[in-house]
Amino acid sequence: MTKDEVRLLISQMQIVFPVVRLVEASLSCQFTLLPDGTLQEEPYRCYTAWKKQRRCDNCISAKALTQKGRMAKFEFVDHNIYYVIAIYLEIDGAPYVLEMVSQVTDDTLLGAYGKEQFVHDVAAYNRRLYVDPLTGAYNRHYFEEQLQGLSNLSALSFLDLDGFKTVNDTWGHQTGDAALKAAAGAIFGCIRNTDALIRYGGDEFLLIFWNMPRDAFAPKLEQIRSAVERVQLEAHPQIRLTVSIGALYRSGTPLDLIADADRLLYQAKRSKNHVCVKLEP
């Protein structure tokens, strides 16, 4: 679509929806299409409208962008319920998502179910769908549905716990679960709320960064490696966790970077408790 066509579409949608906005889902940015055709980036992230400090667990714009289609969801702010429709579109070849928001004010829509129960159940559903219950990291489904097609990625890393099978075989799966949870907690303590930690499978994690300064990337990975190394399990103080990290600094989509980062992880695993990072222009 041209900018004129998008401006016409927005004006038509504003007749029906109180809030209509353009979102660039990769960076969670909101844009305003000015009368002169300029796309002006707003000085806040799109999720601040929902009083959140990080990307939504169920990011409707990311899903619409990844699937290049139309998606819908409910969102909650305080005691208010909003219905959000997101439509993928391209403006002069650049991908955006048009979000249209309306407030659910008719309590009869919820019937005898009750507003509070409705809010609780939908929020719980989103968390079950996208969050690993053991570690609190996002799950593989979240990556595949919402992240793998996004652009403007700064950096990506694979993290794999060293000798995790030995922990499971020696002390049992309950101890293994405690080790995974503790390791994830150490990683969370090192990253920003805009970064995405995904439990990719077993004891392997994928960590995605947006807007990561080039000179801060390798030190950040070393900080994570060191934090995991300092983890202590209260019930098994003899266990020492370490992590190997393969990381790539390069712009692109997660799918563009993931194979190269996996090869770097393989190199790091040779030494164990090691970071193998490749910085590209």
Image (cartoon, helix red, strand yellow):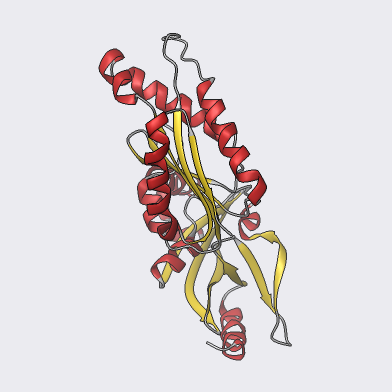
Tell me if residue 86 comes above or below residue 211 in the rendering: below
Residue 189 in view, yes or no: no
Residue at x 52%, y 82% (from the top left corner): 93
Image quarter where the C terminus lies is bottom right
Residue at x 37%, y 40% (from the top left corner): 266
Tell me if residue 154 comes above or below residue 157 in the rendering: below
Residue 64 in view, yes or no: yes
Query: Which residue is nearer to you in this view: 50 or 24?
Result: 24
From this viewpoint, which residue is outermost toward the left?
169
Q: Is residue 185 left or right of residue 265?
A: right
The picture places residue 7, in percent across and down from the top left corner, at 62, 86
Q: Is residue 260 left or right of residue 231?
A: left
The picture places residue 42, in percent across and down from the top left corner, at 71, 66
Q: How many marks?
A: 0
The picture places residue 221, in percent across and down from the top left corner, at 56, 38
Query: Which residue is nearer to you in this view: 110 or 124?
Result: 124
Residue at x 44%, y 16% (from the top left corner): 240
Residue at x 39%, y 44% (from the top left corner): 139
The picture places residue 32, in percent across and down from the top left corner, at 68, 75
- Picture quarter containing residue 38? bottom right
Query: Which residue is nearer to you in this view: 61 or 111?
Result: 61
